[in-house]
Amino acid sequence: MVEFDAIIVGAGPAGCACAYTLAKQQLKVLLIERGKFAGSKNMWGGALYGPVLGDLSPEFLKEAPIERYVKRRILSLLSEESYFSLESAVNNESPDVPQDGAIILRAKFDRWFAEKARKAGAILANGVQVEDLLWKDGSIVGVKVGKDEIHGSVVVACDGVNSILAQKAGLKAELNPVGVKQGVKEVIKLPLETIEQRFNIQGNEGIAWEFLGKCTRGLPGGGFIYTNKDSLSVGVVVQLNALLENKVKANDLLEDFKRQPVVARLIDGGTLVEYSSHLIPTYGVSSTSRLFSDRFLITGDAAGLVLGTGLILEGANFAIASGIAAAKAIVRAKETGDFSAKALSHYQRLLEDNFVLKDFKTFKKMTHVLENPRLYSTYPDLVCSLWHKIHTNDGNPRKSVRQLLKEELKGRVSWWQLARDLIHMGGSL
Amino acid sequence: MNIIVCIKQIMDPEIPTGKFKIDPEANRVIPSEGIPPVINPFDAQAIEVALRLKEANGANVTAITVGGQDVEDVVRYAISMGVDEGILVSDEAFKALNSFVTAFILSRAISRIGQYDLILCGRQAADRDAGHVGLMLGEMLNLPIITMAKAVTLSSDKFRVEHVITEGYQVYEVGMPALITISDEIGPPRRPSGWGVIAAAMGKEIPTWSAQDIGVNLSDVDIKSVRSETIRLFIPDSRRKGEVIQGNNVAEASANLMARLRADGII
């Protein structure tokens, strides 16, 4: 009987990082992917933040299939009549600094990453669906695939947001729509020159553009546009429970979003090449979360390691970091031959010590602020309208900004409420 | 019994239509970036027949393909289904192969394998749907050929083959060695089991034979004798137009729709 040191379920960023690290340490690793190939099931297109990929190998930062680097970042508030934007840009000539964000398409990125793990010595099994954990005497000893039983010293669940394995292991309850966002995304193909022209970028420069306000009909969430090499990732991300409660379909919101004049111009003439929908676990990880048990670890989305603070929506970097940390804990366990929960708890300690769980702690309050419905309709409308009026000259004597603000607030939100929200938001930062 | 199954990779038919591109100048399909090829589904059915024969009578099954290194996964897929050996015939010189040249290369590679009792091919490749290679290969190897089989069984030392005709089938018997092409009426092929995939991924290296290994020099091949040439490759224009006929109420909208259908001469 073949027994693997580690069975990693799911060849996404977490699984590939874990498999690569273990294979490099000469461990016998099986990396199982449900899709026909790694990346084939993936919807995500966005930015990978931070230098974590370089922790695996400095070469990776150069080799990885990166579409563009985020050169400019725009946040736009949308109202019925207008939009208001904040824009920031990095001034360096070649913006290939990973901390600013590297725009990637997961379909390409994951396949590249899985290939790296395979070349390092991991056994990559594509098109295989793990249905259950394999138990013996109350202990996890592997996974079940159809009738086949596959044995391993430790199972690492990298099986994404709706992690069946984490549930089977008893570490997670069924997904609660309150802590989950739904993302729908289209990849829209456009000639490279058109993208460069419309977004005023060149070479490997790219744009991350986020939208708040009208595009989600006031539901908590937002829209986004990322520039790939010769396509755009266009989508909306909305709180799942809000969609369910209001009986709104995320794809209708995406259609709304695409009809916004500012967006419509950017995507005009493009061809739709991909449509996808995905859940994003933004419930956050707290100190009480337990990401390990006997012979079992959970990483990435499966562990809920996505930071969705509104200002930030990051997951891939945490996934990679958690995959590496899981691998380190497994290597240690292998040395002593002890794969118990106690030994594997080293994994969670590593996450607490590096940026992963620290970031979650830092932004913990932020998630509460984001529940404020005024962020998605009242305030975007207010800012757009106020800004517009400040700059409008209709021939009549102009009013002071204070006067205009007073008029704008009227019927929308009280001074007291505004002050409270601002203090709240300020405090959460 | 030694069975050889000829398999081919095709572009994944499940890719979004927007990603399907051709180069009309060169008359060729541009492989879709980032999406690996898959096994021709008709060839997977040929493998299914080989495996059924193996299960019933015992056999050694070899899958062979001609292509670039990126088709290794297709050979591994065959192994994950249960094929015993895989052979990849690959050479820089083997580019833009047509049916004739493919059959020629296969015939040489199969001659190198030497010992075989049955050669199986899918009815055709699901990309160009020509269905030439099996027939040409049988001819080159001087073998009896039965096409479009919906069942193949072994009785004593002969194959009993059900050959599909318009309304029913004919039964043939053929001795060894023979070449049979498999109809899709054989039914869906088995899916690899979990262990099958893992064992194939863990399996030994797949031998790769070059042009030299099988004694093929393409400049010796009389390309003219091929008698097949793609004259024009194009994607038919099938754009559909959508239009919402407006009206203040249903009755008015229906009237507008009728008026429009009449104006366009549809009714």
Image (spheres, rainbow, N blue to C red):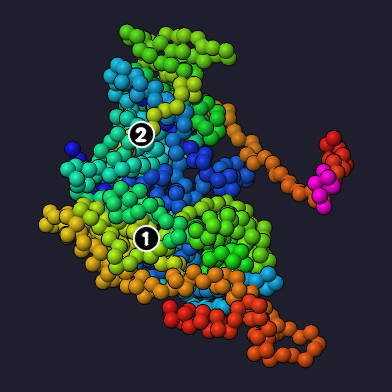
Q: Secondary structure at mark 1?
A: loop
For the point 57% across and 12% down, the residue is: B167
From the viewer's perspective, is residue A133 above or below residue A160? above
B87 inside magenta stretch? no
Q: Is residue A333 visible?
A: yes
Instruction: Give whichever of A100, A230 is nearer the camera.
Output: A100
Is residue A25 shown left or right of residue A265?
left
Say the numbered circle drawn on residue B192: 2
For the point 51% across and 53% down, the residue is: A277
Magenta-tinted stretch:
B248-254
State which mark lies toward you, 1 or 2. 1
Say the numbered circle drawn on residue B75: none
Amino acid found under the numbered disc labelled 1: Gly
For the point 40% across and 63% down, the residue is: A283
Residue B14 image position (x, y, % from top left):
51, 41
Q: Tell me where residue A308 sits by quadrant.
A: bottom left
Residue under mark 1: which chain is it in? A
Tell me how many marks there are.
2
Q: Where's the C terminus of chain A, which quadrant? A: bottom left
Instruction: Give whichever of A313, B28 is nearer the camera.
Output: A313
Amino acid found under the numbered disc labelled 2: Pro
From the viewer's perspective, is residue B58 above or below residue A205? above
In the rendered image, which residue does mark 1 sit on? A304
Q: Is residue A115 visible?
A: no
Residue B140 image position (x, y, % from top left):
44, 21
Is residue B233 shown left or right of residue B11?
right
For the point 37% across and 36% down, the residue is: B77
